[in-house]
Image (cartoon, coloured by chain):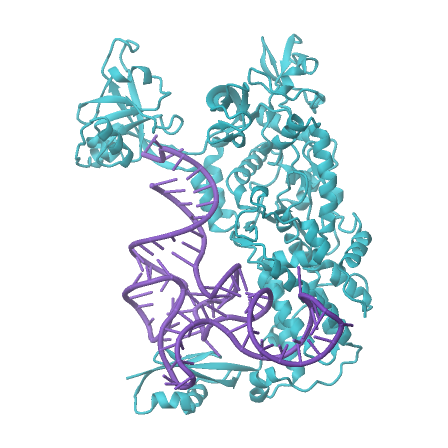
Amino acid sequence: MKSYNHSAVEKKWQKKWGKSAYKTQDKKKGAENFYFLTEFPYPSGNLHVGHWYAFAVPDILARYLRMTGKNVLYPIGFDAFGLPAENAALQHGLNPHTWTYENIAYMRKQFISMGASFDWSREITTCDPAYYKWTQWLFLKLYERGLVYRKKTEVNWCPKDKTVLANEQVKDEKCERCGTSVEKRKMEQWNIKITEYAERLLSDLDVLDCPEEIKIAQRNWIGKSEGAEIEFKIHPTPTLPKGKGVSVKVFTTRPDTLFGVSFIALAPSHPFAKDAKNLRAINPANNEEVPVFVADYVVEDYGTGAVMGVPAHDERDREFALKNNIPVKNSELAPKEVFEKFAQKTTTYKLHDWVVSRQRYWGTPIPLIHCEKCEYQPVPEKDLPVLLPPIKDYVPTGDGRSPLAKARKWAEVKCPACGGKAERETDTLDTFVDSSWYFLRYTDPKNKKEFASRKKMGAWLPVDFYSGGAEHTTMHLLYSRFWHKALFDLGLVSDKEPYVRRMNRGLILGSDGQKMSKSRGNVIDPDEEVKQVGADTVRIYLAFIGPYNETGSYPWDKGGIAGIRRFLERVWRLQDKIHPPPRKPSAPPSKGELRNSSLEGGVSRRETEDVLLHQTIKKVGEDIIAMKFNTAISALMVLSKAFESEKAGAREDFAIFLQLLAPFAPHIAEELWHENNFKGSVHKAPWPTYDEAKTREASVTIVIQVNGKIRGSFFAPRGVTEADAFARAEALPEAAARLSGKQIKKRFFVKDRLVSFVTT
RNA sequence: GGGCGGGUGGUGAAAUGGUAGACACGCCAGCCUUAGGAGCUGGUGCCGCAAGGCAUGGAGGUUCGAGUCCUCUCCCGCCCACCA
């Protein structure tokens, strides 16, 4: 027999499958559609182990679903706009476009080396004008509906480089490039009214099938809080506008502490902040005058940007009061009838509107035109897409605008409304906009007339299962849910929620248990691992490392991967044992079985094997669906060991084993399938079925407990009666010794499992 | 400070309230050998010669029976943070 040459096997099948083997039709006779989505990657340069974890492991589920008869859409694409491309341009003089597309080409090859069953005919790239035309179109739909508005928002500003900085460009409040302290600066930005959907985003979480922790994270992010606004009249002072009705509204969740108020605190940006020193506020409940302060701890855009200071009840209020020699009023709580007179019930959310303007080059151009006379006008649909113009100088402008503002020819246009002189918006869109609708495009990626046709979307949406990283639980997941709801209201999609089921995967750490990073020197290069042990081994290793359905973190272990390789070597050698049909009479029982069941139940070896086979088919299928690949693989290992111990294995059993292995190790399974003359492709073979009755052994082990301690066990036929079990147990010497001379007060019987005695 | 996850052998981990540690790594012993970091067999939670006892971060509780349920507490990780 040939030895297991993983690279020959993998290359051979990857070549045979090519790019079209997993091309998905919108309809397949007799097969139900299943849309299985994984978050698409940013084309950062090359695949790291995290990519393998994100794409190769879910591929197990995609392949399994296909074998169970589902018509599975498992697409791939690239979230290709973003800052790193622009940084590469600035630092190394590369063109962001070239940089991005070269990365994509390289990563595509790596994805193929994974043996992932992506439908490459549906590949999408968000920086492709054919894609971002529709990002712009959808953005304008939201604009027309009044969901997009302009507002002054704080940005990070580097005074030396005279540029806006992204959060990730700010390290310890200093500019990453020059080390200058970053300032906060207010700039006009485009905002999307996600807060208008806060209530629906909250309530529709109930229908989402995902772990409770994801729902909780979203609820907390939305941060609904029931509270009250209370108006404090301001004692007139010369500096404030004259006239009656000058007052400060505070927001509180504890209006009942109104009697304990000893000061008012304003956010530094509050309109009265400048005059705070001279102001006195009047508590409406008791007409007491209290001082007004400005305090850093009051958040400007939460509540009303002003709080009532109750040092007796609030830790931060107390701290502030102590520092400023404000008296602490040990209060009495106000009765409901009293505070309700002054407190206006309100609901606030922590969720902020979504700032989508970016002063960046490498993003989707915002399709708006500014005219002196007509203000902002949308770019007419016939002029979409607004193409990103090629430029040579990616250095940001000194006034905080995107480098695009330097492309004068591109920026200067006629106003679509009045035909007068006008200028394009030169900011680009946050890349979270691009990724808020990408899964819609996968259903109809080549459509030139629509972002996706109703019919195609109808075939696949909503997404049946969405797998991704925990870091996207709040931002991306919430943005895309919002976007979908907005499109639903516009009548553009048919579902209120984009995803039916969502799961977060864990994290792969370096072998030192630390997060993988170049600076720590613990980065694993998947290409190198694939070269040494093969893609199948790396796939199974990652799936085996820990439960995929939990957000734990698992260190990469060199020894562990060698163990998986050993497993596949053993699988390879199993073919030596294959015996052609008809089945041989059963072989003599092994030691293990003597210990187990054959003495008691009188079962033959063949029956015992059947039980294990049926148990394994059941377990592997159930575990794959639950994304518990680690225990599925363990079951396959157990089955392979059982086959190994046989002198000659049945051909049909080996076929079943290969079918079970196929989703995990697609190449070796296909090779062995082919080499042993099974028909067609193992990946087109149906998933093996099991007989529930045959998953149960004929004999069971009954455990004996006396006063809560385990004192022994015995074999009995399955279904043994309560009376028989007690009689057998009491007769057993180890139990009898504990029971003699005592009175049995209580007996418990758990069918096919346990008897328990309680004595005096 | 808030929220959310976790604490089980030397390690990654298993375990519908019913024999804790499946499977795998590592380690130990032996076999084989073309002397390889290969393969095979057996062993491997802790204490103990044994009988037996003790073990799922710690302390209580419920139960015939708790890793699993309840209360308190300590520690670790992640996310958000002067969010009233």
Q: Quadrant of the N terminus of chain A?
A: bottom right
Residue A364 visible from this viewpoint: no
**Letter of the chain in purple:** B
Place residue A420 in its image quadrant. top right
List x then y, in percent, for residue A681: 79, 61
From the viewer's perspective, is residue A509 above or below residue A358?
below
Give percent across and percent down for residue A274: 32, 15
State the quadrant of the C terminus of chain A.
bottom left
The answer to which of A742 and A643 lies nearer the viewer is: A643
Percent across and percent down for residue A529 are 68, 53
Residue A661 visible in the shown view:
yes
In this picture, is A690 found above or below A81?
A: below
Left or right: A676 as drawn, with respect to A631: right
Residue placed at 55% from the left, 20% from the top? A161
Q: Is residue B33 above or below residue A140?
A: below
Among the chains, which one is cyan? A
Which quarter of the picture shows residue A634? Answer: bottom right
**B62 sits left or right of A644 in the view:** left
Count of number-bearing discs: 0
Q: Is residue A294 above or below residue A46?
A: above
Q: Picture coordinates of residue B78 (x, y %)?
A: 48, 45
Taking A444 as reference, is A478 left or right?
Answer: left
- Seen at 57% across and 48% down, the residue is A500
